Image (tube, rainbow, N blue to C red):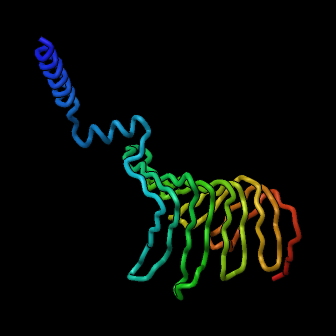
């Protein structure tokens, strides 16, 4: 009698598990939609290094300890860098031109705009200038930085402190708002 109970119990368990498995069949679109509604990434990379090339020449490198891929979003697909990001852009002679680092970043693929936050530092190695702020927006199409946060811009001649600025991604031709500091001016 005991063995019959065990067989019946096992049969019920197998039947239950089989029903559960067949009721959970999904296609890839349903899984992607499920991940999107739960705000889960479609992919994850750790210690990522991505090299960008143009005509066989390295133009930039992206280095991050953690990358989440949310490209499954229909409206605003993006990548998240929750543990920081480092971008190194190279000049034609393959020397470091501009380096960008920050503690956190979001990059939106449809708009090509990125937001970098927390201890943001941009260094133009050629011009020996440095920008420091807590938040920076980067329009990759127009190659332009902007922010409404406090900043420090250090050049070979000046140190500018202020709140709000715009500049080219190589830190040249900048527009600083609400500024204080020592500036060297020349008449042309």
**Residue sitting at x 73%, y 63%:** 132
Q: Residue furthest top?
A: 1
Viewed as shown, does residue 106 lie left or right of 102? left
Q: Is residue 34 above or below residue 51?
A: above
**Residue sitting at x 37%, y 39%:** 35
Which quarter of the rendering shows the N terminus? top left
Q: Residue furthest front?
A: 2
**Residue sitting at x 72%, y 71%:** 130
Residue 103 in percent (x, y) is at: 62, 56
Viewed as shown, does residue 109 lie left or right of 125? left
Residue 182 in percent (x, y) is at: 88, 70
Residue closest to the eye, 135 or 103: 103
Residue 62 in percent (x, y) is at: 50, 67
**Residue sitting at x 67%, y 72%:** 123
Residue closest to the eye, 96 or 77: 96
Number of labels in the image equals 0
Viewed as shown, does residue 64 lie left or right of 149? left
Q: Residue furthest right?
A: 182
Q: Is residue 95 above or below residue 65?
A: below
Residue 61 in percent (x, y) is at: 50, 72
Which quarter of the rendering shows the C terminus? bottom right
Residue closest to the eye, 150 or 47: 47
The image quadrant of residue 7 is top left
Residue closest to the eye, 10 or 59: 10
Q: Is residue 162 above or below residue 12?
A: below
């Amino acid at each position: 009698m005991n063995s019959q109970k065990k067989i019946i119990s096992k049969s019920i368990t197998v039947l239950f598990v089989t029903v559960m498995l067949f009721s959970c069949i999904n296609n890839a679109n349903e899984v992607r939609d499920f991940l999107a509604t739960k705000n889960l990434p479609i992919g994850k990379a750790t210690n990522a290094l991505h090299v960008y090339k143009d005509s066989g020449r390295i133009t930039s490198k992206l280095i991050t300890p953690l990358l989440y891929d949310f490209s499954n979003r229909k409206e605003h697909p993006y990548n998240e860098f929750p543990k920081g990001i480092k971008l190194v852009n190279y000049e034609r002679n393959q020397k470091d031109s501009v380096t960008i680092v920050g503690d956190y970043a979001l990059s939106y693929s449809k708009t090509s705009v990125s937001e970098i936050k927390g201890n943001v530092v941009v260094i133009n190695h050629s011009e020996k200038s440095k920008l420091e702020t807590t938040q920076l927006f980067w329009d990759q199409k127009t190659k332009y930085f902007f922010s409404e946060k406090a900043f420090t811009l250090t050049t070979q001649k000046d140190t500018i402190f202020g709140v709000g600025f715009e500049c080219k991604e190589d830190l040249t031709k900048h527009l600083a708002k609400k500024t204080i500091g020592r500036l060297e001016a020349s008449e042309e």
